[in-house]
Amino acid sequence: MTQTILIVGAGTTGTTAAILLARRGYKPVLIERSAKTNRKQHAPDWICRRGVELLGELGIDCAAKLGDAYDGLTFHSSDLTKTAQSAATTPPAWRIDYPQFTAHLHQLAREAGIEIVHSSPARRIELREEQVCVELEEGDPLEGSFLLLADGAGRTLCSPGGHPAVLSSVSPKTPGRWFATLELPAPSRGRDPRDGHLHWLLGLDRQQACCLWWWEGSTVIVSLFAAGTGDSVNKLLCATANKLVGAGLIASKDAIDPAAVMLRPAPARSALEIDSHVNKRCLVIGDAGGFIGEISGQGIFAGVWSARIAVDAVIAAASSVHPQDQLRDFSTTWRSDMADYLRPPNTDMHFLLPLIFSNRQMADRMAAAFWEGQNI
Ligand SMILES: Cc1cc2nc3c(=O)[nH]c(=O)nc-3n(C[C@H](O)[C@H](O)[C@H](O)COP(=O)(O)OP(=O)(O)OC[C@H]3O[C@@H](n4cnc5c(N)ncnc54)[C@H](O)[C@@H]3O)c2cc1C
């Protein structure tokens, strides 16, 4: 009989896992609390070349969903007096619209015959010896052989090591790591919107906060990935955006408004800090498992990568008399394959910063670390 694999969360990670499982003859059921991805929660995103290549290797064609390519990275010093550029001859990344991107994956999932249970949050999971069970806010509980938890950075269900997990939410007063994003409409005579570089403000604080901005048509997007409460990260983003406007690096026809900031929790801990992603018949993947690039906050590529490794582990477990042993291979494999991508630079960034502005090779190394997750 075909084994049912339950997946909580139909973001890029969960949906990729579902597509891969269906193609290999399993019956994934995707459980998603929202009717569709909330546009307000997601500013325009980008995906790196390795992410596009990985999706291609998995037979997931997303070429039609890629927006304009970036053609390089410009570094800015925190006092905004220095810049360094690293240009790329092949695109290191492309702009994407996340809701459109996930809608495309959902379409591919439906074409593969995958059941997507929309609009009903999973509110409790139970991990048993022989089976897993997911209770929904509405409707009958679902049962399956294994569970993949891909419920995102808010970790509404996931509490690694502390099951059974129940539905919860994260308030902006909670300390952790947050993404804050602001879209600013350019005034009619602003900076040239054809600027194809991603801009990175270095050394904003000692905790390696990452502030980026880039042009999206006639809008400039300013984004911050930083530690603190959601409220403090929002404040830091607004102060930084005002500083950029004051220095003439970006322009906006509207005043910077904290109420316009989109705020979302980033994974509270990186995958490397989490003791285990393996529970009884259950693996934690994507943002829920802290799989995001530590420097750039890129999570689409790392989420898809974790999904691929998890699917291999689940398939091995499904045909094993010791399924738990096979599931444990997930940890060994992602640590050996992905750790370099996930970990922060070995060197203290504050020693590197002056070099980036005086040494072109160092700027190129830093850019590679950012786009590709290479270490420095
Ligand atoms: C503002 C912002 C900008 C970002 N920009 C980039 C970028 O440019 N490039 C990049 O690579 N990464 C970016 N990231 C990170 C990237 O979006 C994530 O790492 C990536 O989407 C991981 O996908 P995921 O499927 O693991 O999580 P998500 O996309 O968050 O998906 C989780 C899904 O689970 C669902 N869910 C949660 N709880 C439940 C429940 N109890 N029951 C049912 N469903 C549930 C949610 O509704 C959601 O659809 C950004 C993140 C944010 C917040």
Image (cartoon, grey):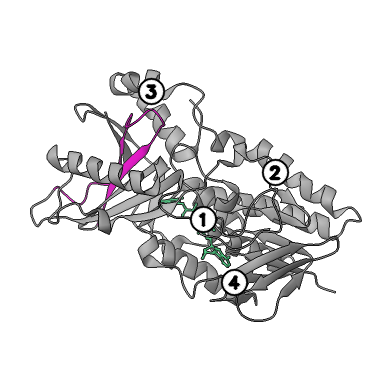
Point out the stretch of residues depicted in magenta: 191-216
Marks 4 and 1, how far apart at CA: 24 Å
**Residue 334 spot, x, y in % from top left:** 67, 42
Q: Residue 276, labelled with which disc?
A: 2
Marks 4 and 3, how far apart at CA: 42 Å
Ligand 1 within 8 Å of disc 1? The answer is yes
Q: Earlier in the sequence, mark 2 or mark 3?
A: 2
Determine the residue positioned at 20% across, 58% down. Answer: 218
Q: Residues within 10 Å of mark 1 (few under 14, many from 20)?
A: some
Q: Earlier in the sequence, mark 4 or mark 1?
A: 4
**Residue 223 spot, x, y in % from top left:** 33, 47
Q: Which residue is mark 1?
A: 154
**Residue 154 spot, x, y in % from top left:** 51, 55
Secondary structure under badge 2?
A: loop
Q: Which residue is mark 3?
A: 362
Hey, what amino acid is under mark 1?
A: Gly
Q: Earlier in the sequence, mark 1 or mark 2?
A: 1
Q: Is residue 178 left or right of residue 110?
A: left
Q: Residue 109, labelled with which disc?
A: 4
**Residue 330 spot, x, y in % from top left:** 73, 47
Callout in the foreground (4, 1): 1
Q: Earlier in the sequence, mark 4 or mark 2?
A: 4
Q: Residues within 10 Å of mark 2 (few under 14, many from 20)?
A: some
Ligand 1 within 8 Å of disc 3? The answer is no
Q: Is residue 213 left or right of residue 373?
A: left
Hey, what amino acid is under mark 2?
A: Ser
Determine the residue positioned at 68% across, 36% down. Answer: 336
Counting every numbered tag in the picture gives: 4
Marks 2 and 3, how far apart at CA: 35 Å
Q: Earlier in the sequence, mark 1 or mark 3?
A: 1
Hey, what amino acid is under mark 4?
A: Ala
